[in-house]
Image (cartoon, rainbow, N blue to C red):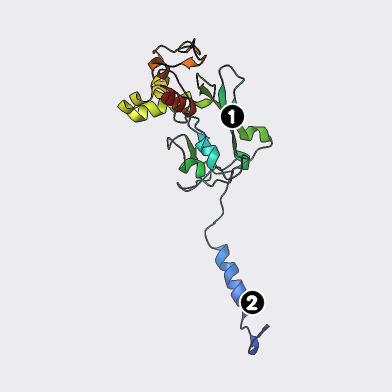
Amino acid sequence: MEILTNTGVKKLRWPKLRELKEAVTVVFSPRFTTRFPAEPCVVPESYRGKPEFDLDNCIGCGACVNVCPTGGACLSQVDDLEAEPPVRKITLHYSACIFCGNCQDNCTTEKGIKLSNEWDLATFDKEETTETHEFELQMCEKCGAVVGTKKHLVWLAEKLGPLAYTNPSILLAKSSDLLKLEPGEATQESAAGGEEAVGAKDFMRILCPKCKCELNIRL
């Protein structure tokens, strides 16, 4: 056999013997392929497989949705304000997952979602690759804006400890036995200007940052 090089024609010596040697070596070498599905396949500990939610630690904050690079194809979030009570729905389509690990790395609680070692995700029904989890929302008692999920507020209260007493919204979300004022109960129409009168009891309501800022300014 001959090959053409920059310096001219160069002969390859014994090419067939070399190929024969490689073939014989492979025949008598240990098998390097797996016997799946006859035998289970063991993946490394650092393998990034199917994402799985841990609902005991997931607070529905949506951090995983925000950092997912698939643009909503894998992780999506919808706030259903018409439901009673209002809920946040977080949907996982793991058939569109690229297994980047951003959701796991940016989880607020660091335990809410993990990439498991499950790698055999083949299925004939694509609907089986979709799962949706609902989290009850906490709304602002004044303007009706979304404050966050109740689990998120409770988690913040537990995380802050005694510092939670500096924020009435977090305190009320954690202490369900406290008196919850009905919308409009803590305000009265001013006879002179027709504006809502505000007082200290207004602070004991769950308010969004905008309403809380306005309350502080007016008070």
User: Where residue 190 appears, x then y in whole percent?
Assistant: 48, 12
Side of 125 where 160 appears, left or right: left
- Secondary structure, mark 2, is helix
The type of residue carrying mark 2 is Lys
Q: Quadrant of residue 83?
A: top right
Name the residue that disc number 1 marks: 132
Residue drawn where x is 53% and y is 47% of the image: 100
- The quadrant of the picture occupied by the N terminus is bottom right
The structure residue drawn at horizontal position 52% and vertical position 58%, both measured from the top left corner, is: 30
| Disc 2: CA contacts within 10 A as few (<14), some (14-19) or many (>=20) | few
Please give the name of the residue rendered at 58% of the width and 63% of the height, measured from the top-left corner. Answer: 27
**Residue labelled with disc 2:** 16
Q: Is residue 201 visible?
A: yes
Q: Is residue 106 above or below residue 9?
A: above
Q: Which mark is residue 67?
A: none
Which is more N-terminal, label 2 or label 1? Answer: 2
- Closer-to-camera residue (55/44): 55
